[in-house]
Image (cartoon, helix red, strand yellow):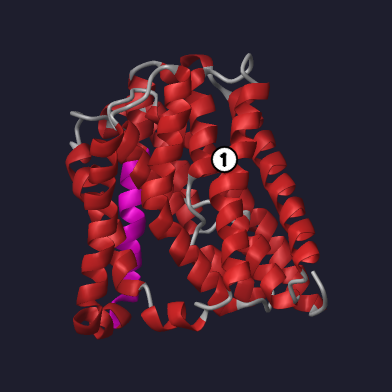
Amino acid sequence: MQWLKKLGLDGFMLALIGAVALSAVWPELGRSGGLLRIEVFTGYGVAVVFLLYGLTLSPQKLREGLFNWRLHATVQLSTFLLFPLLGLALVSALGGVLVPALALGFFFLAALPSTVSSSVAMTSIAKGNVPGAIFNASLSSLIGVFLTPLWVNAYLKASGVAFDLWPVILKVVMLVLLPIALGQLLRPLLLKWLTRHAALTRLLDRATILAIVLNSFSDSVAEGVWAEHGASTIALIAGLSVGLFALVYVLMQWACRRLGFDRGDTIACTFCGSKKSLAAGVPMAKVMFGANPALGLIIAPIMLYHFLQLVMVSYLARRLGEQGGAP
């Protein structure tokens, strides 16, 4: 099974693939109003995911990386400015190739915050600045509560189909930021219990994401959204995801050299600044696009990007860790 791990295919990724396959062959099981009534669980599950994130977020680790402002500014500008602009350029250039739901999915991917756990883990493997990675990945998740809906609303407004922004932001705050804050308040009381039952909390977190994916894809299959989208669409999403990651990674390397970052900061900056969060993206998509029958198609780019970024960054992290020299 080691070769699967080298490809980024851990148990969770295999379960995600299984959820998509199950929705394709038996959409009635996971669709809204279907046999499992899974939408009831996913509605509350979004808040549970971010409550667990708030419980595990270490204020001490955040303080350790607080004052490296050049690193923080570079990562956040990459995540919330460079990425969305590149995403906008991509969907504009491929306007005749990407259907509207898929174009929205790519822009939504570009507007998402950075991922936390894998950014920190890969920075550690590569022997980079771990406190800086923890600070920036965590800060990105908090900023994304506001900037991701703002970017998506601006994109939709330009397309003539904007949603009512402030109710969406309020809903995101209630389902994302409020649970994180509650988790931080409860952390002193529950940290020991959480540490003892880390496997259980991790299982609950991932089960929620799997349920949302199953529900979203089942609804899309039931509505016939995927009827005209097969292997060629998946190949297109994969190719664009690899290209987008490679472009951002190269640009971040260039920026780090120009700014004179040392090896540790360069690794943290390139890893955090080039990654996007599936754990935040799927629940936020449920909040922002929950009524859209094409939700499965909208979240397809973040699912494939998540897998491919793990493959590419795992390789880079191992190579950098073994070299121990300049990235």
* Total residue callouts: 1
Q: Tell me the residue at 45%/81% (across/down).
A: 63
248 left or right, relative to 146 = right
> Can residue 200 be found in the magenta stretch?
yes
Q: Residues within 10 Å of mark 1 (few under 14, many from 20)?
A: many
What's the residue at 46%, 38% (across, down)? Answer: 151
Q: Is residue 3 left or right of residue 157?
A: right
Which of the 4 image quadrants contains residue 171?
Answer: top left
Report the side of 276 relative to 55 (left or right).
Answer: right
- Answer yes or no: is residue 303 visible: yes
Amino acid type indicated by mark 1: Pro
Q: Is residue 59 above or below residue 90?
A: below
Helix, strand or loop for disc 1: helix
From the top left corner, tell me how far across and down residue 118 is, in percent: 54, 64
Q: Position of residue 93 (x, y in %)?
A: 68, 23
Location of the N terminus (image quadrant): bottom right
The quadrant in which residue 177 appears is: bottom left
Reply yes or no: does residue 207 show up in magenta: yes
Would you place residue 68 above or below residue 52 in this image? below
Q: Nearer the viewer, residue 201 or 76?
A: 76
Span highlighted in magenta in the image: 196-213
Please tell me in which quadrant of the rendered image residue 264 appears. Answer: bottom right
Whether residue 122 appears in this view of the structure is no
Q: Is residue 61 above or below residue 78?
A: below
Compare residues 274 and 151 and report the one nearer the observer.
Answer: 151
Q: Residue at x 28, y 46 (%)?
A: 172
Residue 52, percent from left and from top: 29, 66
Task: Identify the main secondary structure in magenta.
Answer: helix
Q: Which residue is mark 1?
A: 84
Q: Nearer the viewer, residue 52 or 85?
A: 85
